[in-house]
Image (cartoon, helix red, strand yellow):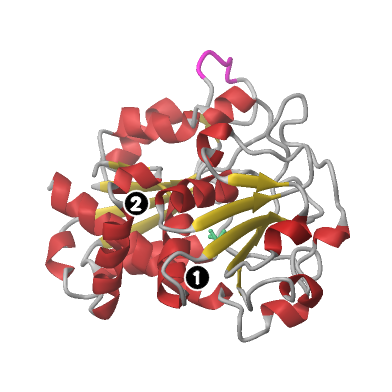
């Protein structure tokens, strides 16, 4: 593996989950792999979980880790070619990337969708510039359209908590005050479509995701119907994908909030969310605090999903 953006980069996801569960039993067993190797984590956007778990995964593997917050202390970066740089951006990504690459062996990039240009976002322009101009293995730490480390951690968590061989997993849209990217639901759908689960997506009309990620999943516009007999409920807000509403909020319908009444429709389902979460918008206090909530185990598994990806990158490239 040289880049990590999609479930297919892992090959067989079920094998990858089994590998991750083995790593979890002894997370320091591969410390030799990262000796004298440096991991650079480049953040264009805020983070709590990704920042901590990625550094911890690198340290578990014996790597040195450097974190660069581009918008706090580094020069402001221009990302588009051809721009006359007479504004507040002092450096172009096309110089900055090769310079960053001088000081590391592997690069993680967090760079959210900007919602100004759907093509720019959906071509993963910034992440692909890192792949092209760094000459190093590169992985997404949530880029414009995908968050694969989160989805891999979610799948590991489902595997650990499932009570039937093929659980019903429901991805449900829920309301939020701000326009959020589609990266988390895109990657969740990507991974669930490769896993041995009965996968259903539910959202209000107009919130359909990119068919490239939805693939064969069942899409239901009635949340109550979708939640029936669910074993796992994965809540997330996202903004509209379909033109001409790309990046827009179409609804703040609070009847989509995941409440105890909604969870009562399920098969005593586990509640999941990638965090950070807006309580009493996305999910009520009682649901997120219930014994069925997996939000903390999911976050903990971010260390394991990242360690599995970094282990493969180190084994395959050095
Ligand atoms: N789930 C997730 O990626 O969290 P952070 O944005 O805090 O990294």
| Mark 1 or mark 2: whose residue is earlier in sequence | 2
Q: Nearer the viewer, residue 228 or 18?
A: 228
**20 up-or-down from 1: above or below:** below
Query: Are the residues at dot 1 and dot 2 in contact (C-beta closer than 8 Å)?
Result: no
Q: Give residue 299's mark.
A: 1
Q: CA distance from mark 1 to mark 2?
A: 21 Å
Prevalent SS, magenta region: loop
Indicate yes or no: mark 2 CB to ligand 1 under 8 Å. no
Q: Give residue 40's mark.
A: 2
Residue 141 appears in the rendering = no
Q: Where residue 184 appears, x then y in whole percent?
A: 57, 51
Ligand 1's image quarter is: bottom right
Dot 1 falls on a residue whose secondary structure is helix
Residue at point 35%, 60% (across, down): 306
| 2 displayed left or right of 216 | left
Q: Where residue 284 appears, x then y in whole percent?
A: 78, 74
Dot 2 falls on a residue whose secondary structure is strand
Residue 221 appears in the rendering = yes
Indicate yes or no: mark 1 CB to ligand 1 under 8 Å. yes
Q: Where residue 275 appears, x then y in whole percent?
A: 61, 65
Residue at point 82%, 54% (across, down): 177
């Amino acid at each position: 593996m040289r880049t990590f953006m999609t479930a297919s980069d892992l090959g067989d996801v079920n094998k990858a989950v089994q590998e991750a569960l083995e790593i979890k039993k002894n997370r320091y067993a591969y410390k030799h792999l990262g000796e004298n190797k440096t991991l650079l984590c480049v953040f264009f956007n805020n983070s709590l979980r990704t920042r901590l778990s990625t550094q911890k995964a690198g340290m578990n593997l014996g790597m040195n880790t450097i974190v660069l917050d581009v918008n706090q202390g580094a020069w402001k970066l221009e990302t588009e070619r051809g721009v006359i740089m007479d504004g507040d951006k002092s450096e172009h990504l096309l110089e900055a990337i090769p310079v960053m690459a001088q000081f590391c062996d592997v690069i993680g990039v967090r760079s959210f969708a900007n919602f100004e240009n759907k093509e720019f976002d959906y071509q993963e322009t910034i992440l692909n510039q890192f792949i092209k101009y760094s000459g190093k293995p590169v992985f997404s730490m949530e880029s414009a359209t995908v968050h694969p480390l989160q989805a891999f951690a979610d799948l590991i968590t489902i595997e650990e908590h499932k009570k039937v061989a093929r659980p019903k997993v429901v991805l449900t849209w829920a309301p939020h005050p701000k326009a959020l990217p589609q990266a988390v639901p895109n990657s969740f759908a990507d991974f669930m479509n490769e896993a041995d689960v009965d996968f259903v997506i539910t959202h209000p009309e107009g919130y359909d995701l990119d068919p490239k990620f939805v693939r064969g999943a069942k899409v239901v516009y009635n949340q109550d119907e979708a939640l029936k007999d669910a074993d796992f409920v994965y809540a997330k807000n996202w903004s509209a994908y379909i033109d001409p509403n790309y990046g827009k909020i179409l609804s703040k319908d609070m009847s989509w909030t995941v409440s105890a009444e909604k969870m009562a429709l399920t098969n005593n389902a586990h509640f999941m969310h990638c965090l950070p979460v807006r309580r009493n918008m996305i999910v009520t206090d009682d649901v997120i605090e219930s014994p069925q909530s997996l939000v903390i185990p999911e976050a903990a598994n971010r260390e394991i999903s990242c360690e599995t990806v970094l282990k493969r990158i180190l084994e395959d490239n050095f």
